[in-house]
Amino acid sequence: MQAIILCGGRGERLMPLTSENPASMLRFAGKELIYYNIEQLVKAGADRITLALGYGGSRIKELFEDGTFQGVPVDFSGCSDEGTAAAIAYAADRNEKNIIIAEGNSLFMGDLTGLVKQHTDRNAVCTALVTENAVGGCKRVCSDENGEITALTEDPSAETIGCELSLTGVYMLDTAVFSQVNFGGRRDFVCDILPELSELGGRLYACESDIYCAKILTPCGFLEAQQNILYSGGVRIINNTSDNFNGVTFIPPVYIGRNVSVQPGSVIGKGTVLDDGARIGARCRLIGSYAGVNSSLSDFCEADGTVICGGASAGRYVKFGFHSVAGSGCIIEDECELAHGAAIWSGTSVKGGTTVRDTIDRGSESRVLIDDDGIFTLPHISGSAVSAVSFALACGSSLKPCSRVVVGCSDKEGAALYLQEVKCGLANTGIDVFDIGESTPQQTAYAVNFFKAEIGIYADLNSHCTFRLMSRGGLPLERRSEHTIEQIYQNRRFRSCPPDGFGKIYSGNSAVSLYESFVRSLMPHRLKGVNPQIRACSKTAAGSADRIFRGINDINGERITFHISADGSKCTAYSQDSGNIGSEAMLCLGIFAAFSKGISVSVPYCFPSSADRIAENLCGRLYRYYNCTCGTEDSEARKIAAGEDNSFVRDGLCLCAAVCSYLSERKISLKKALEDIPTIFSSQRFVVSNCEPQTVIRKLCGRSYEIGEGAELENGVSRAIVRPMKNRQGLMIFAESMQCEQASAFCDEICARIKMLDK
């Protein structure tokens, strides 16, 4: 017998519980709702399960990767029509005489064999399972002495006295009905098909049962069903917790999932569920509440009849009112208070000290955690060690087990401690870690290539701890990879590995020496006519520069002072003859040197067109890549950009080496070399707009942008790129022209046009 479960609805009344997953994936005492229902259907004789999917269908498929449930085949169907009737008709196997149908947002616990027997004995067209114990807004029914349903109603009135029975959401259906009744369009099975069968007479029967059934329509209904399961004793209840949770008071019945942490002094009251990976701080008080998978409550929090969804995080002294809801991945800072019935949407951040009296739903989309430079900043110093581990778990969970990750840190005091947290988090997800210790971001990028790692993570510590993510060659991760990490971090969907599956941690200290050998290989054994002096902000970078250039410079040559930027990615220069040379001109000189040796170069899409002119003059191959590409349109450009020959584009020390080598080989001064570089002035601005980036760019240039770098504008003498920022709160404008004033004026003109769009 085939069983069909309708699990395609969005569950609007359940929001924000269903903002990430459909209602059928809500968890009750450590198990998804859909598992409870399938178990009962299989016990009733179903030998094949079909899931009618819609909203969140991909998430449901992940639960049944092998296509079975306890040996019973599970398949999936989808229908373009929105009605549940059409979904049933599309999923049904017409070769079956009878099928059993269950609503995905109904929790039913009890024997269904009586329904099957009564339906087949009567040879009925449709039989609905009804009970007096249903809760949560189920439709009421009236039936005659033969069990035939004569009326369906939401609210029994004087005309329908005797409607004490409620639909449970489980039905038996004769497939012959599909040829007799219209199941097409947007018709609903309960609201349209069942009343029609009742009016026809002799077709719709009720099978009364004493099973428990709950229609999960609201967060309040979710809590009631959760507590009914606990009080029924049908699941594993933690009663004796003294061995596992010293100093914690539990008032049974309480369900405790796997890997749950509760700090001393907390009270977990009756009817509370702490799902897998939940973390409860010291002196918290939870009564009749639900803490979802990998949710986190800091010290002194209180929750009474509250739903805290998976991945939600609350700071210290947060008070949750009765029937309040914290959505998946939301962050509630210290000393906030949620009033009775208040709800915070998924992905929303609430600042400390805020009193939430209604629904905060403006954060329904995922928050941006990794900025445009690929940097993740820990949200706050308090509990930042835990956040660092969570970030590492998210990075590791986004990669395949046994992947390789290179980690390094700055020489700032405390950065090494955060690096330890990152290593532990990665190893716990089955990732092999290569630790190169104190280094620069560029040395970490070199190690990513050398160890053939998937990504690199560089820890730095200023006012906050930051982690820079990079792929091969120091390139930013693709936007979809960053988005995956953000999603996992927000929702705490971390991969867990058995002890024998933990990743290994290797020492990669030799990577720094190998990097220095690589930079040294870019130059001759002795420089001729060049006397470079390298100045760097980082002690680590300054030490490497000293070891690389020591003993090879020409003390009688032109004295050139190179300044490495704070992040090590750029360099400027100064000599007595040439004066100050900006970073763009220096990079153009490096590009000129590469083209003169027949080396292809790949630069970011927004780099000035002076690089294109150099390529034209020397017949060089110039590629441009998009920092946040999500496709393969620039795969060749990114492949070249990740190569060692292009290290100078993102590495100030490599650029110094390339320029010094070029000057030494040509035996020319820096001023002479710059005569071959086209002079193009650039300017950039950041502008905030209330309009969506798509709208801004469409109105500026008459079309929507397709690439992550934005759109290109020209006015005859200047060229500009308008680039949307990841947080959707502003745009960056990069303008260039043959004259400095024109580039700046074009920037100002575009800013003014964007401001006009807000009016």
Image (cartoon, rainbow, N blue to C red):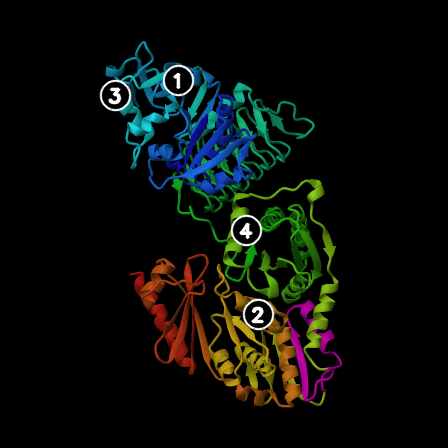
Identify residue type, mark 4: Ile
Cα distance, mark 4 to mark 2? 25 Å
Classify mark 2: helix, strand or loop.
Answer: helix
Q: Give the residue pinned by disc 4.
A: 485
Identify residue type, mark 2: Ile
Residue under the image location 64 percent in, 72 percent down? 536
Callout in the foreground (3, 2): 3
**In this rendering, is residue 674 above or below 222?**
below
The percent position of residue 562, horizontal first and vertical second, equals 62, 79
Callout in the foreground (4, 2): 2
Cα distance, mark 2 to mark 1? 68 Å
Q: Give the residue pinned by disc 1.
A: 119
Judge left or right: residue 397 versus residue 447: left
Marks 4/2 in contact by CB < 8 Å: the verdict is no
Q: Give the residue pinned by disc 3.
A: 200
Identify residue type, mark 1: His
Q: Is residue 535 magenta?
A: yes
Cα distance, mark 3 to mark 2? 72 Å
Q: Earlier in the sequence, mark 4 or mark 2?
A: 4
Q: Is residue 131 visible?
A: no
**In this rendering, is residue 538 above or below 694?**
below
Callout in the foreground (2, 1): 1
Q: Earlier in the sequence, mark 2 or mark 1?
A: 1
Range drawn in magenta: 525-554
Cα distance, mark 3 to mark 4? 55 Å
Cα distance, mark 1 to mark 3? 18 Å
Residue under the image location 52 percent in, 46 percent down? 490
Marks 1/3 in contact by CB < 8 Å: the verdict is no
Q: Give the residue pinned by disc 2.
A: 640
Q: Earlier in the sequence, mark 3 or mark 4?
A: 3
